[in-house]
Amino acid sequence: MAKQPSKPTLGRLPSIRDRVQDTLSAHRNELISLLSRYVAQGKGILQPHNLIDELDNIPGDEQAKLDLKNGPFGEIVRAAQEAIVLPPFVAIGVRPRPGVWEYVRVNVSELSVEQLSVSEYLSFKEELVDGKSNDNFVLELDFEPFNASFPRPSRSSSIGNGVQFLNRHLSSNMFRNKDSLEPLLDFLRAHKYKGHALMLNDRIHNISKLQAALAKTEDYLSKIPRDTPYSEFEYVLQGMGFERGWGDTAQRVLETMHLLLDILQAPDPSTLETFLGRVPMVFNVVILSPHGFFGQANVLGLPDTGGQVVYILDQVRALENEMLLRIKKQGLDFTPRILIVTRLIPDAKGTTCNQRLERVSGTDHTHILRVPFRSESGTLRKWISRFDVWPYLETYAEDVASEIAAELQGYPDFIIGNYSDGNLVASLLAYKMGVTQCTIAHALEKTKYPDSDLYWKKFDDKYHFSCQFTADLIAMNNADFIITSTYQEIAGTKNTVGQYESHTGFTLPGLYRVVHGIDVFDPKFNIVSPGADMSMYFPYSEKQKRLTSLHGSIEQLLYDTAQSDEYTGSLNDKSKPIIFSMARLDRVKNITGLVECFAKNSKLRELVNLVIVAGYIDVKKSSDREEIAEIEKMHGLMKEYKLNGDFRWIAAQTNRARNGELYRYIADTQGAFVQPAFYEAFGLTVVEAMTCGLPTFATSNGGPAEIIEHGISGFHIDPYHPEQASELLVEFFQKCKKDPSHWKKISEAGLQRIYERYTWKIYSERLMTLAGVYSFWKYVSKLERRETRRYIEMFYILKFRDLAKSVPLAKDDAS
């Protein structure tokens, strides 16, 4: 009788430890050889490329090497993010997929393998700095127990879609358990604004009363014309238990009530999101951005002042329009207010940064509110670096709370923080005021500076990262929701770690160890990408809108033969296309790297001119340490490669209207925009260039890799391989020379990409909906959140305060 095939059994997937152990059995010689090569490099950290290079270079039988590479251990090496070598041990941090980590340690002498916990791995890593420690009582930060009962997705592809997951969770709870509808009723009854009841009044005090009242109102409204204004039936609805906020016409009120009836009968995620997006909740918004020179003119290019200022000014214009539209559709006549809270700088360097209140142009209800930094010695008069602000922020938060209350005659409904300092102040205010908090990091510094956590003591005098990383942890855990511009900001790519993900587990030896800092699967994460201001940035082909009156001054910037503090270098052949870049002049933006890459490629220099808009030309004008080094490097490159004739360096330009026309002028030359940063969290200039129809080449590290589809709507370049980047540019311009339609094809595909994904209209609609959903979630989950808040408060008081006090006060403020 034939043997029946055995049924497949469900088995546990082998752990990383099991796979290493199995490889030791199957490929003993090759694995020992490989691990010995790692150990031979001595004490230190090996990066992914070191690990893979050594795997390629082990001696011995070719087939055995191939089997090792293609087997389970090869997979481990390809998924490894780092290895810690402390002979005879090699410990490997393995990331099988975004957001998921395992740790294993091999003793190469004894050929033993052990799985490590996060804490054990970090403790081992600390030995690189402090040697072996016998201290078993290290402060460990662990947020996981507080979030253990919170729902979260498990697939890496779900990261950044927090609101969709939350809506599914909330609606399924309501579906399974009708008692879960009670908090929705309480939430609607709690709505008031400046003493005005909204949505429901005291006539409705349970779900059955609500359902009956909705049915009765539906019957009444179906008998009157759909366009009847709310004011004409307001008193009838009041008698049934409803207050203003449902809509401005009978049609709109009916739609909103139908949504609620659907939720009460058979809740589903999209209906819940649409309904919560319609509930009037957000009338007063506060946006925090303390550092740098925050103003509307003459500030771009000043230290610590760049994309974040542009982002917020564009954000508030779109947000005010969306708030006004929603308030009108809700049938309300309230006036919204948006306050951008920043630092008042008495020595304002010719900007408006010494004015307390300034209306934002293009808005009616949005103002910049400036509050000074002060200490016991008085008000700080001058600009200070974003790395030096920490000792001022607690007092600043208290002063800001008073100023906001005076300006708004109450508390805001929603607070948005920006960057580490703004997010910390937003956390302190949201905690005090009990309002919904959104965090926008823009850029988390930890990923910009390799090993800045492990070797924080080397960086601390200059950058005070111990304060910054602590502030970041507090803010990201205190926030109700977090907005990022890209997936990569949260969870990186298959091969790179995300900015937030790098805060999952890390150590600051001698200070504390983070075993669970943030979970990238947390449903608080949402990807909401910004756009460009389309009144400033629009396609070069829209001839009737073009600012031709600025062409004279643009041509002077590009071609004037005189040299000055505003421009240097020259372009001899005006018929050549221009490749163009505009950014802050710092190390990470890698502008000098682009100049060097251009300088070394003679074919590229024959085909195109290069124009750079960045920083100061006169080194004496800069007070920023990184910028000074880059200015000196730029002058050195111009001299070394004799760039005069096909290179123009223009100092930072603050006139946005002219900058928009400059992009279009470059497009007229059939040129391209290049963004060469070593890392770029989002890439607003990439969006601006593409919105103007300029073919764009941008870094593959960070946000631009998601904005651009390589070879379709632009091109990715690797800043660590500049020769490949310059060859890609040569190939593009040679192809355009033979076939001019190729340039147009890339230009049009770039524009299409922008209209589908990257506009401020899409952004502001999404942000307002998120504010609604997370305000509801905050309301229904307030009991579970209290423990986290207390833990954060203790960490702030016991750790952050002392770190902030250790940062020296600025000179004009030191006692």
Image (cartoon, grey):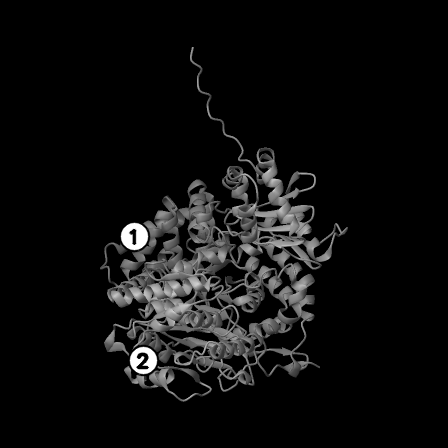
The residue located at (67%, 72%) in the rendering is: 807
Question: From the image, which quarter does the N terminus lie in?
Answer: top left
The residue located at (48%, 46%) in the rendering is: 153
Q: Please name whichever residue, 524 or 513, is drawn nearer the observer in this view of the structure.
A: 513
Q: Three-letter amino acid code at disc 1?
A: Glu
Q: Is residue 269 left or right of residue 228?
A: right
Q: Give the image location of residue 658, x and y in percent.
A: 36, 80
The reply to whether residue 316 is visible in this rendering is yes
Q: Is residue 557 left or right of residue 435?
A: left
Q: State the SS at label 2.
A: loop
Q: Give the image location of residue 233, x and y in percent.
A: 30, 62
Instruction: Find the distance from the CA under tag 1 to the CA under tag 2.
Output: 69 Å
Question: For mark 2, what is the residue?
Answer: 574
Q: Is residue 539 left or right of residue 21?
A: left
Closer mark to the observer between disc 1 and disc 2: 2
Q: Which mark is residue 563?
A: none
Q: Three-letter amino acid code at disc 2?
A: Lys
The residue located at (44%, 82%) in the rendering is: 297
Quarter location, residue 577: bottom left
Q: State the SS at label 1.
A: helix
Q: Please name whichever residue, 233 or 332, is drawn nearer the observer in this view of the structure.
A: 332
Q: Classify mark 2: residues with Cα within 10 Å, few (<14), some (14-19) or many (20+).
A: few
Question: Would you say the residues marked 1 and 2 are in contact, meaning their CB atoms lie under 8 Å apart?
Answer: no
Q: Is residue 131 left or right of residue 363?
A: right
Q: Which mark is residue 218?
A: 1
Q: Give the image location of residue 466, x and y in percent.
A: 64, 64
